Image (cartoon, helix red, strand yellow):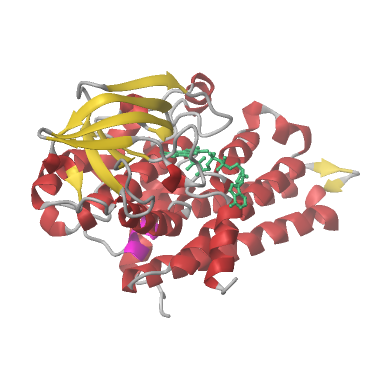
């Protein structure tokens, strides 16, 4: 294993942080309160090259390796306090663009990737349903084959980016087929008859990342919109999840770094009992724990990205996602506690990080499911 960073990788990370600090934090408290997505920030990210990061150069993308993409996202997370924006970007990068790169036809790549990379199009990945979450393959959405292609019927929920989506990667099961081998993935474009985005969903955190339910009611999709062979949806989903789990929390590493620095500054400046609170071991110990969690999480994420580049890294991706999400929540709680009442106040921005972090132990497979994956990989 070798992921010592090149000067170019370090420069890219620093450039992403500087870009994010300058361009992505405008009006965040107001947008957060209103649950408002920033299209301007999304387009700025596209101009900077974020949406093109993992797409090969021959398809017009940045063509960077996965570790480099992770480093750029970490830099972005350090500079950008809008974790919702980062989450929306992640939802598209790893769960829409990468499946198209890896499993899409040439025509699908040429039709959708340029717009997704330029910021003109926004993508979603729709798997979860009212009756199927962790047990994703028990989905009820059906893909019935007809002369025109497929007719999709069902409901998807908790779909990130759905209210602003142009392109949806939707998973559906073929009637009477066995659960794992009977699922296919389809691209469904906004405006397709039978596709409705309903019920915008309000969230505890990540409030600038829009979410909705998607209803498919006799939605006809031509055969050329199926991604991969018929029945390959399960394999596509599993492969996508490994990538997503490896990379989705790269931005959280940057957030945790910024959080740590904020806490050190506050612990030096805030005085009680005639001295900085950082002099108290109970406070200093929290900062030490935050540092330790961050360093361990960083190594796990870099390892998953680096190994993923060489081939499958199922266990490493699950461990990286599990550890980093729980570390982010634990450090965010410590950050609130260290700031006292001020940390609990909305104006501090410290509590927002905690609300944003909690979701990370649920999306892309809950912490419990990551533990199930790890236990299985260990032979249980
Ligand atoms: C912010 C956010 C964004 C999301 N974005 C998307 C998206 O874009 N597209 C999409 O398709 N989905 C999305 N999801 C949904 C997400 O994938 C699901 O929430 C997740 O898979 C868990 O499913 P569930 O919420 O139905 O929980 P359930 O599966 O109902 O689980 C409830 C509880 O039971 C536990 N549990 C379930 N099964 C087991 C088991 N076998 N062993 C131990 N414990 C178990 C879970 O860990 C959890 O604690 C998003 C979720 C969130 C929070």
Of the 4 image quadrants, the one containing the N terminus is bottom left
285 vs 74, left or right, is right
Residue 46 vertical placement versus 208 (above, below):
below
Q: How far from the left and from the top, in percent, is residue 74?
A: 44, 54
Residue drawn at (27%, 37%) of the image:
143
Residue in the foreground of this view, choosing between 249 and 214:
214
Residue drawn at (11%, 58%) of the image:
58
Residue extending farthest bottom: 1
Residue drawn at (57%, 73%) of the image:
378
Q: Please indicate, yes or no, whether residue 62 appears anywhere in the rendered image.
A: no
Image quarter of residue 194: top left
Q: How far from the left and from the top, in percent, is residue 208?
A: 46, 29
Q: Please indicate, yes or no, whether residue 138 appears anywhere in the rendered image.
A: yes
Q: How far from the left and from the top, in percent, is residue 367?
A: 59, 52
Residue in the foreground of this view, choosing between 203 and 233:
233
171 vs 302, left or right, is left
Question: Number of marks in the image?
Answer: 0
Residue 48 vertical placement versus 238 (above, below):
above
Residue in the foreground of this view, choosing between 288 and 189:
189
Q: How far from the left and from the top, in percent, is residue 377?
A: 52, 70
Image quarter of residue 294: bottom right
Residue extending farthest front: 176
Of the 4 image quadrants, the one containing the C terminus is bottom right
Residue 70 part of the magenta segment: yes
257 vs 11, left or right, is right
Segment colored magenta? 66-72
Predominant secondary structure, magenta span: helix
Residue 193 part of the magenta segment: no
């Amino acid at each position: 294993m070798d992921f010592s960073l090149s000067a170019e990788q370090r420069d890219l990370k620093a450039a992403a942080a500087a870009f994010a600090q300058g361009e992505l934090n405008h009006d965040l408290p107001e947008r957060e309160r209103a649950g408002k997505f920033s299209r301007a920030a999304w387009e700025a990210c596209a101009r900077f090259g974020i949406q093109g990061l993992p797409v090969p150069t021959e398809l017009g993308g940045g063509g960077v390796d996965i570790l480099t993409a992770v480093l750029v996202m970490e830099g972005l997370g350090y500079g950008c306090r809008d974790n919702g924006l980062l989450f929306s970007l992640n939802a598209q990068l790893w769960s829409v663009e990468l499946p198209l790169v890896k499993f899409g036809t040439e025509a699908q790549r040429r039709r959708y990737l340029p717009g997704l990379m330029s910021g003109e199009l926004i993508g979603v990945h729709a798997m979860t349903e009212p009756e199927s979450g962790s047990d994703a393959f028990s989905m009820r959405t059906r893909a019935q084959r007809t002369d025109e292609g497929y007719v999709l019927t069902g409901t998807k929920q908790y779909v990130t980016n759905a209210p602003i989506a142009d392109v949806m990667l939707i998973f559906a099961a073929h009637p009477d087929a066995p659960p794992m081998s009977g699922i296919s993935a389809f691209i469904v474009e906004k405006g397709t008859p039978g596709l409705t985005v309903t019920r915008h969903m309000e969230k505890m955190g990540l409030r600038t990342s829009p979410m909705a339910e998607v209803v498919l009611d006799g939605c006809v999709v031509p055969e050329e919109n199926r991604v991969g062979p018929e029945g390959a949806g399960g394999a596509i989903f599993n492969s996508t999840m490994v990538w997503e789990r490896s990379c989705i929390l790269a931005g959280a590493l940057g957030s945790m770094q910024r959080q740590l620095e904020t806490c050190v500054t506050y612990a030096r400046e805030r005085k009680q009992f005639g001295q900085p609170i950082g002099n108290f071991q109970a406070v200093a110990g929290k900062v030490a724990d935050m540092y330790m969690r961050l360093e361990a999480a960083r190594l796990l994420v870099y390892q998953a990205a680096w190994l993923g580049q060489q081939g499958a890294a199922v266990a490493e991706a699950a461990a990286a996602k599990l550890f980093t999400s729980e570390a982010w929540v634990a450090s965010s709680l410590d950050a609130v506690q260290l700031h006292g009442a001020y940390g609990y106040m909305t104006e501090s921005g410290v509590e927002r990080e905690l609300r944003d972090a909690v979701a990370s132990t649920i999306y892309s497979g809950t912490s419990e499911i990551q533990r199930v994956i790890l236990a299985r990989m260990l032979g249980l």
